[in-house]
Image: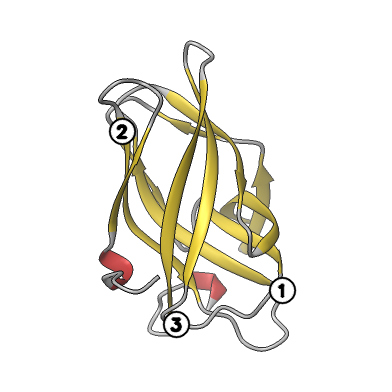
Amino acid sequence: MAGLSGAGALVFALSASAGEALAVREARVLATVPGQGVAAAYMTLESPLAARIVAAESDVAASVQIHAMSMDGGIMRMRRMDGLDLPAGRAVRLAPGAVHLMLVGLSKPLQPGDAVAIRFTVRERGGASRVVRVTAPVVARGRGAGGGHD
């Protein structure tokens, strides 16, 4: 997957609708250390149509889960979400310490310079579903790249 330009990679994944696209910016997955079975993924998504991500998967993980982090009585808590709403024309940022993706049950360590393919099942407001494919570069941990997931 050479040719990716790092964390600033811009990806457009075409939908089934003529001329419509889901814009994906700043996609990245944090590198792992030996024996680590999970990795965090971040990106900014923008859909021209009201839609909802109802599922996600990747060949490098047993599951891809949408998680939200929040403070509860001074304790950071992470909870799994069953989907993610994408309001029409509004950017939705998946970020450290907030809503993000967790790749669970990794099949291999993820090294800086690798690329991870993620497939989203997106359901538009009218009920039509489509699969959106995103390729995210693996970036080095540290320097605050992953918030609580460093």
Residue type at tag 2: Ala
Q: Which residue is mark 2?
A: 21
Does 49 appear above or below 91? Answer: above
Q: With 7 as the anchor, is 53 left or right in this view?
A: right
Q: Is residue 73 visible?
A: no
Does 19 appear above or below 59? Answer: above
Q: Which residue is mark 3?
A: 112
Disc 1 to disc 2: CB gap under 8 Å: no
**Among the two numbered marks 1 and 3 on one chain, the one whose residue lies closer to the N terminus:** 1
What is the CA distance from the residue labelled 1 to the residue labelled 3? 16 Å
| Front of the two marks 1 and 2 | 2
Q: Quick one: SS at disc 2?
A: strand
Q: Quadrant of residue 127?
A: top right
Q: Badge 1 local density, few (<14 within 10 Å), some, or many (20+)? A: some
Q: Name the disc covering residue 37, or none.
A: 1
Residue type at tag 3: Pro
* Residue at (48, 10) in percent of width and height: 126
Disc 1 to disc 3: CB gap under 8 Å: no
Residue type at tag 1: Gly
* Residue at (67, 62) in percent of width and height: 61
